[in-house]
Image (cartoon, helix red, strand yellow):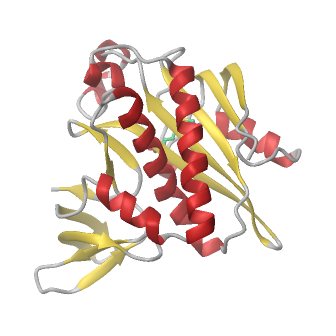
Amino acid sequence: WAGRLHRMDTVVSTQEEAKRLAESGALEGTAVMAEEQIGGRGRMGRKWHSPKGKGIWMSVVLRPAIPLQSTPQLTLLAGVAVCTAIRKMTGVEAGIKWPNDLLAGGRKLCGILIESNVGPGGLQYAIAGIGISANLSEEDYPAELKEIATSLLIEGGVPVDRVKLAGEVLRELKIHYELYLEQGFGPIARLWEEQSVTLGRRIGRKTQQGWLEGTAIGLGEDGGLLLRDDNGTVTSVCSGEIVLI
Ligand code: BTN
C-alpha cells in the first residue's frame, strides 16, 4: 500500500489521472487529489460539482485479487472508510445511503464512484473516486443542488483542513481494505449496517416492471440491499438508485 497523495491543480477528472498512474504500474494506495475538476463525474453518467479549493476530489488506485462480481463490495467498503474518517475528524454525523452516498441532515455530503478496469485475467485494477464536499457554502451550489447537497462546512460550522482529511480517508481506506482482504466482506457489511441511514427505512425503486417498494432489512453477501415488500417477499437490489421514503 503506497498511501502516497499526488496533489494537482486543475484536472478534467482525478479518475483519469489515477488511471494513468495505474496503467504505468502505480502501487495500490496511490492517490491523486485535485484542487478543481472541470469534468468531474458521478455515478450513472452524472456530473460532479467540483469547485476550486472547496472539496476533496480524490481517486485511489486499488488492485484487489477478487472476482469481478465482487467489485460492488469495494463500493460499500469505500463508503464505510470515508464515513469513519469524516465522523472521526469532524464530528459531523454522516450516514450511508445505499450503496455509498454519505448524507448529513438528509442531504448529500459525499459521493463515491468505483471504476473497474477489466483485462483477460479479470479485474486488473479499480479506481475509487471520492468526492467530499468539504468547504462549500450554500452560495457555492447551483440552484438545482441547493436542496439536495450539503457540506462539512454547512453541517459542522467550521472549515476543514482538506489535506488532513484526505490523509485520514486514505488511512481508513487502508485499514478497511486490509480487513476486507483478510476476513472477507462480512465484517465490512456489519460496519456498513452500523453506519447506514438506509436500514429499517422504507425504500422505493424504479424497476423494468414498474415500482418496487419495501423495507430495507440488510445487506446480502454480494453487497446488494435486501428489501422486504408488504407480502414478505425479500428481493436483493444490486445496482442503480433507491429512494428513501
Ligand atoms: C456520485 O455520487 O455520483 C459519485 C461522485 C464521485 C465524485 C468523485 S470526485 C473525485 C473523482 N473524480 C471524479 O470525476 N469523480 C470522483
Residue 120, quarter of the rendered image: bottom right
Taking the spot 70% from the left edge, 21% from the top edge, the residue there is 8
Q: Residue 48, can we see it? A: no
Q: Is residue 46 above or below residue 124?
A: above
Image coordinates of residue 74 in percent, x first then y, are: 55, 59
Left or right: 116 in relation to 141: right
Image coordinates of residue 68 in percent, x first then y, are: 65, 72
Left or right: 69 in relation to 75: right
Q: Residue 227, can we see it? A: yes
Give the total of numbered labels: 0
Image coordinates of residue 23 in percent, x first then y, are: 84, 48
**Which residue, as the protein is rendered here, is positioned at the far left?**
230
Closer-to-camera residue (47/104): 104
Left or right: 228 in relation to 60: left
Taking the spot 35% from the left edge, 77% from the top edge, the residue there is 236
Q: Is residue 169 above or below residue 151?
A: below
Taking the spot 46% from the left edge, 58% from the top edge, the residue there is 76
Residue 30, quarter of the rendered image: top right
Residue 235, quarter of the rendered image: bottom left
**Which residue, as the protein is rendered here, is positioned at the far right?**
24
Taking the spot 73% from the left edge, 57% from the top edge, the residue there is 63
Q: Is residue 174 above or below residue 41?
A: below
| Quadrant of image for the C terminus | bottom left
Left or right: 161 in relation to 209: right
